Amino acid sequence: MKFFLDTADLKEIEEAASWGALAGVTTNPTLYARIGGKLADFHAHIKRICDIVDGPVSAESVAMTRDEIIRDGRELASIAPNVVVKIPAMVEGLAACRALADEGIRVNMTLCFTVPQAILAARAGARYISPFVGRFDDISEDGIAQLSDVVTAINNYDFSESTVAGEQIEIIAASIRSANHVTQAALMGADIATVPFATLKKCIQHPLTDRGLEAFLKDWEKVQ
Ligand code: E4P
């Protein structure tokens, strides 16, 4: 499984990239608003992220009609070669996804909650599909079970003739809220987990690691 960072915060991205295990970044309008981003600076901000991270950087279109999404998608894709256009799972989004994929532009279909949404996204040429885990948990449903269904269904088929350059679709476990979500996503074979900075930090921490380290350091003092 690869790790993406789910943020628009440049400091977080720089810090996580320096750990040597970061494969990409996902942003969304909420994450951009959270850092005080402004529309006029949006493309420049995405470029800054692309300059830090080698891998795919998802930038979301907030347009609601296929023509506007396609126009948005082309503009976003022109920012840098590693931009992936994030489009919500909806009818207009599917149509725009197909058109952009046919032009060689990679799409991440977001706000994906069900197996039919995921399969339609795959058939429409999405390169990445983002099932949301935590938001299911928020409404007292089992987000991990839903993600598992999507992983199984997508892996049942070969979608390579739908995608840009016949690339394999990758499933991004999104709306990740805990290290346990990451564990479950990895066990079921989700390709990527996109994780908020604080949660990613928790993924490398464990009280037994801390306790073990403390004991090693104490014992090391004895051999000085
Ligand atoms: C995915 O790409 C989204 O940006 C994100 O994972 C949404 O997570 P949230 O439900 O915590 O807002």
Image (spheres, rainbow, N blue to C red):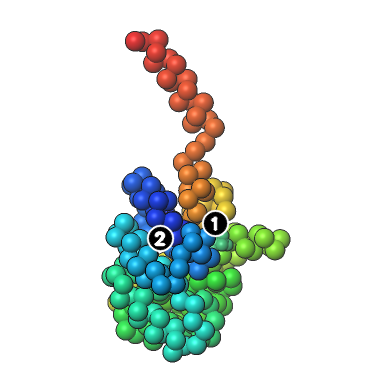
Q: Position of residue 111 (x, y in %)?
A: 55, 71
Residue drawn at x 49%, y 82% as measured from the top left: 63
In the image, residue 71 above or below residue 144: below
Q: Is residue 2 left or right of residue 90?
A: left
Kind of residue sitting beneath label 2: Val
Q: Which residue is mark 2?
A: 25
Figure quadrant of the N terminus: bottom left
Q: Dividing the picture into quarters, in which one does residue 141 lie?
A: bottom right
First in sequence: mark 2 vs mark 1 = 2
Mark 1: C-beta under 8 Å from nearest atom of ligand 1: yes
Q: Secondary structure at mark 1?
A: loop
Gap in Å between the C-alphas at discs 2 and 1? 14 Å
The disc at residue 176 is 1
Q: Secondary structure at mark 2?
A: strand
Kind of residue sitting beneath label 1: Ile
Is label 2 or label 1 in front?
A: 2
The disc at residue 196 is none
Residue drawn at x 46%, y 64% as measured from the top left: 37
Q: Please say if the residues under marks 2 and 1 sit with CB atoms less than 8 Å apart.
A: no
